[in-house]
Image: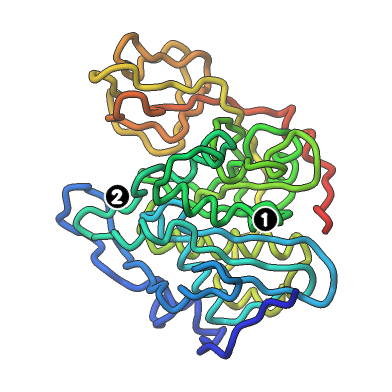
Amino acid sequence: MQHQTGEQNTAPRSDVGDPASAYYPRPFNPTPPHAHGFPIETAPVPIGPWARGNTGIPYLWSFEASEPGPHVALVALTHGDEICGSYALDLLLRTRLRPVRGRLSLLFNNWRAHERWDPAAPNQAFYIDHDMNRIWAASMLNGADRRVELDRARELRPFIDSVDVLLDLHSTQQPSPPMTLPGWPVRKTTFACSIGWPGLVVRDDGGGRLRDWGGLGMTSGTRVGVVVECGQHWVAETGLNAVRAAVRLLDRLRMIDAAVVTPLVPTRPAERARVVTVTHTILARGESAGLGRIWPDIAEVAEAGTLLGHDGLAEIRTPYPNAVLIMPVARPRPGAVMLRIGQDDPGALASSVHSTSPKR
């Protein structure tokens, strides 16, 4: 099926990555006096113009080339407060990027939660009823519960089931380098390393994530889903990183003409892959859970046994030398993941030397 749209205004390609242009992430307030304490350098792009989609599903656009190839989905706003992906999709739609083979779909996922974005309390747009990156499980989607995110996931389920490669664009609360989270299967780590950027690849597990739904998360097969964390929420560079991640993936799959796309945003050179495998996932087990300090989202602790904090029942200490702390939460809510600890995994990196592109 050929999915197309009517004419849209297009940005001059030479103008898109220029901080002085209207097509750069829109300036907001670099030093807001808001209680959340994090910089808000950009306002969200208006996504209303993309509401109708061209597939019969709101906020879902899809374009198919005459040449066969994989079905690739770029996903933004799985968490409604993480606006970097919407910047990337808006830019690609405005510039009318089309695949040269296969099918390219662009999805503004939890758009209803995103409507709640408020600069005074931006995190309230995270979700409405359910974290939309924790509900992709048959037990939830086949259940009788009717909630905003569950209904949206059910609406999207047939579409997601048709996708060969899915890139879910996210951002982080704390300062963070860009990183790819492919999940646990080695084949997905192999695929993530083959893309070439970001170079940091973190293997983690956990249920209900969109990237792992159905065949996208199996230990075998050709369908694959990955998350890219593009940087800190609401920082201008994070939006550009989302574009970089999308373009790098599409180029790797030979879905686009790289010469057409590279002027869209200043590129980053390919990076040597570094794979970190999560060995410990620590939950907050009581009201007193917390870390002794605020850490960046990726931090290394040289000494084994270093005291990090308390999970509400017991001390948290590094289990081995050169431990990598991943997305630590200094003041977590009870029951939530407060910290992941990982270590460099040369074995996983060695397995990523050879890889193949998913075919349709």
| Residue 123, disc | 2
Q: Which amino acid lies under the numbered mark 1 shown in the image of this protein? A: Ala
Q: Is residue 311 left or right of residue 177?
A: left
Seen in the picture, residue 102 relative to 346 is either above or below; the reply is: below
Q: Which amino acid lies under the numbered mark 2 shown in the image of this protein? A: Asn
Frontmost residue, 273 versus 256: 256
Q: Position of residue 332 (x, y in %)?
A: 30, 29
Q: Is residue 353 left or right of residue 27?
A: right
| Residue 270, disc | 1
Q: Crowdedness of circle 1 by 10 Å Cα count: few (<14), some, many (20+)?
A: few
Mark 1 lies on a secondary structure that is loop
Frontmost residue, 273 versus 279: 279
Seen in the picture, residue 351 relative to 226 is either above or below; the reply is: above
Q: CA distance from mark 1 to mark 2?
A: 32 Å
Q: Residue at x 43, y 40 (%)?
A: 145
Corner quadrant of residue 330: top left
Q: Crowdedness of circle 2 by 10 Å Cα count: few (<14), some, many (20+)?
A: some
The quarter of the image holding the N terminus is bottom right
| Foreground: disc 1 or disc 2 | 2
Mark 2 lies on a secondary structure that is helix
